[in-house]
Amino acid sequence: MLTRKHNITLSRAEVDFFFENGYLGPYAAMPSAEMGEIRRRIETDVLTSDGPNPRSRGQSRHMDQPVVYDLATNPAIIDRIAGILGPDLVVWATNFWNKAPGGAEIPWHQDINFWPLEPPVNTSAWIAIDRATVENSCVQIIPGSHRQSLPHTRSPEGVAFGKMANPDSFDASGAVNMELQPGEFFIFSERTLHRSSKNTSDKRRLGMSIRVTVPIARISQEDSPLHAGHTAILAKGKDVMGFNRYAGRPSN
């Protein structure tokens, strides 16, 4: 189902497709030309500067960079996720995935194994900053793999993640290549198996993930990639629970 639609409200058929297959898209958040200007700002202001997380320049930049905050709260993304998770939405994490030529493989995995959420309710969006193709290592997903949580094991040397889904526990023959133009995105479940190969091309592949949960989920900063002082975004609706810390759009 690699259709490109521009309406923001999900149809019943799209919701059914998501629950059956664990993903939706691609969709356009903006035209490629508009993403070109955003790309220049990311290259100038984000990739070359330290952010709030001392362990990674690419993480949590919604906290200090308006361009990232605006991407993370783009209505084309958030309103579609509302069709899956409901009207009250929290963007709890953002992360850039900058895979240069020669960049290492990310093995098959389910994100639920790595996240500091309880309960682990999440829908992610992956938006292309650069064009993402098979040649420069676009994300691959396995439709329907979200229906069960799979065992994970230690990854071999030379790949980007320390853990991966046990290869004996799934069949990758039906994998889909999520090729994207700049400004396009897809959304997927916290249990959808996905990977990206080594970048064997001469072109960079830069994308950003936007992690969205609901206010009943507690975001933990202990034993997680998040850092002390981390704040989320109340992207839609309201939070009557009060478990998590929020901040508004950064001004600089």
Image (spheres, rainbow, N blue to C red):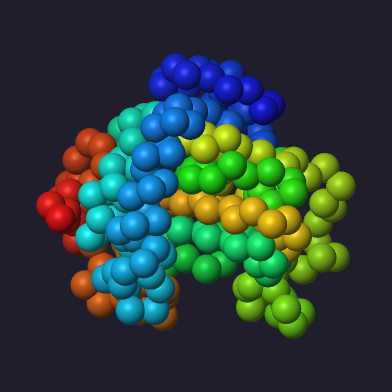
Position in image of residue 76 (x %, y %)? 39, 29
Quadrant, the C terminus: bottom left
Position in image of residue 86 (x %, y %)? 36, 34
Along the viewing direction, whichever of 23 and 75 lies nearer the viewer = 75
Q: Is residue 191 above or below residue 47?
A: above
Left or right placement of residue 203 versus residue 247 in this view = right
Q: Determine the residue positioned at 77% across, 68% down.
A: 166
Along the viewing direction, whichever of 26 and 213 lies nearer the viewer = 26
Along the viewing direction, whichever of 64 and 218 lies nearer the viewer = 64
Position in image of residue 35 (x %, y %)? 42, 37
Q: Determine the residue positioned at 53% across, 53% down.
A: 206
Place residue 178 in its image quadrant: top right
Decide if residue 185 is in sight here. no
The extreme left residue here reads 251
Position in image of residue 251 (x %, y %)? 13, 52
Q: Determine the residue positioned at 33% across, 50% down.
A: 41
Left or right placement of residue 5 versus residue 8 in this view = right
Q: Is residue 246 above or below residue 128?
A: below
Decide if residue 165 is in sight here. yes
Q: Determine the residue positioned at 30% across, 58% down.
A: 45
Along the viewing direction, whichever of 172 and 94 lies nearer the viewer = 94
Quadrant, the N terminus: top right
Q: Is residue 91 above or below residue 238?
A: below
How many numbered markers are drawn? 0
